[in-house]
Amino acid sequence: MLGLVTQTSNSPSRLVLAALALPRREWNALCATPWGSACKSRPDHKNTPIKPKNTTYSDFGVWNIAHAPLYPTLPPPNAISAGVGSRWPCGEGNLERSCLALGNWSPAWLNSTPAMSNKEKPEEQNQSSWQDFIYNPRTGEFIGRTACSWALIFLFYLVFYGFLAGMFTLTMWVMLQTLDDHTPKYRDRVSNPGLVIRPRSMDILFNRTDPSKYQQYVQHLEEFLTAYNDSMQNNNELCPMGVYFEQDAEEVKKVCQFKRSLLSQCSGLLDTSFGYSQGKPCILIKMNRIIGLRPPGVPYINCVAKRESFLQIQYFPSEGKFDKMYFPYYGKRLHANYVQPLVAIKLLLSKEDYNEEIAIECKVEGSDLRNNDDRDKFLGRVTFRVKVTE
């Protein structure tokens, strides 16, 4: 059972307005008492409680009232202002109320302080709530935590991430202990070398009568062959031909000579244009470095033109061979001055071959090195195109 009450004024002429929200059967019981004259009898509602007009239930404070002490504490009948209830129509729907205008009578339960609803909070408190969240001067909290709480969180994460950093450092150190400074640990995917060409272009197109059209190719070849100059190669070892140059027991690995002059007409010493001015360009071919590679047999380069008619090609050194003395390779650190052996090919194009794009495929043969892998077209082979105009 609930009682709804508000204090409209402190003036004696203005009465305390008390609204009693009672079940119908208890309201009928109340009307049967000496105070029943305070009830508004309506034929259509049968003494049903009604609600004051233009009021809401949030206008009243709420108290829990026991049934037993309610009726003895009601005022005497002469304290009730008659006729007041007749001014208030019935409430909406099934939620119906009736109000009694009481005299200067205030029971103890009417003097209770009502609980403030959320809607009645001061606007100043709502406006300052976000400021108190950032910093509350009363509790000293910053973003909901005290300085001690923030210090404990910082200490926890400092220890936590410090532990993670230490674990990461330890695992990296253990892994590095298993690696060799000179040789990769896993080399199963690069056991066979690929072929590359110089100049570094898969499409060599130029006009033999215009030096500006082929100057880029000539310049690239000249820069690449600088490390093969005879003056620099004289500092390397003159190794016996046809045998591997084994140096496993040596701490400092030596390098066998490969002089630029071995490339003859494609060395750039006799013809500074590398044959491009004559319409007979030179192409340099080399194998990628593979640590510890010892190719069996006598590997050599074989190039063919992918067309029906035959194309004459010259090889330098003779027969396009890679001598065994340039193997094995011991890695960049141990073999700091190592230079790969080269094979130069000169395409002997005629005027009938001009203005025609010719595809050239070169493979390494004479050994068990792979050169026909469909998944890797550069493994043991290379394909490029040449077109000469005039």
Image: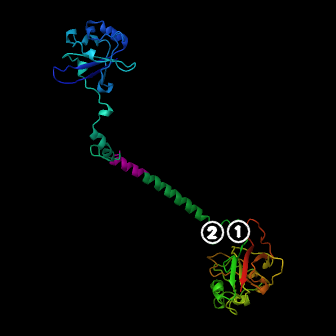
- Percent position (x, y) of residue 2? 33, 19
Q: Quadrant of the N terminus?
A: top left
- The answer to which image quadrant residue 313 occupies is bottom right
Please, is residue 128 above or below residue 63 in the view? Answer: below
Q: CA distance from mark 2 to mark 1?
A: 17 Å
Residue 180's disc number: 2
**Residue carrying label 1:** 190
Q: Which mark is residue 19?
A: none
Q: Secondary structure at mark 2?
A: loop
Could you say where residue 165 lies in the image, as x and y percent from the top left?
Answer: 49, 58
The amino acid pointed to by label 2 is: Asp
Mark 2 and mark 1 lie on one chain; the one further toward the N terminus is: 2
Q: Can residue 58 be seen in this snapshot?
A: yes
Q: Nearer the viewer, mark 2 or mark 1?
A: 1
- 314 is within the stretch colored magenta: no
Instruction: Say if 53 sits above or below 172 in the image.
Output: above
In this picture, which residue range is highlighted in magenta? 144-156
Position of 43 with respect to 272 (left or right) is left
- Counting the numbered discs, the total is 2
Residue 343 drawn at (x, y percent):
74, 82
* Residue visible at 80% across and 78% down in the picture: 304
SS for callout 1: helix
The dominant secondary structure in magenta is helix
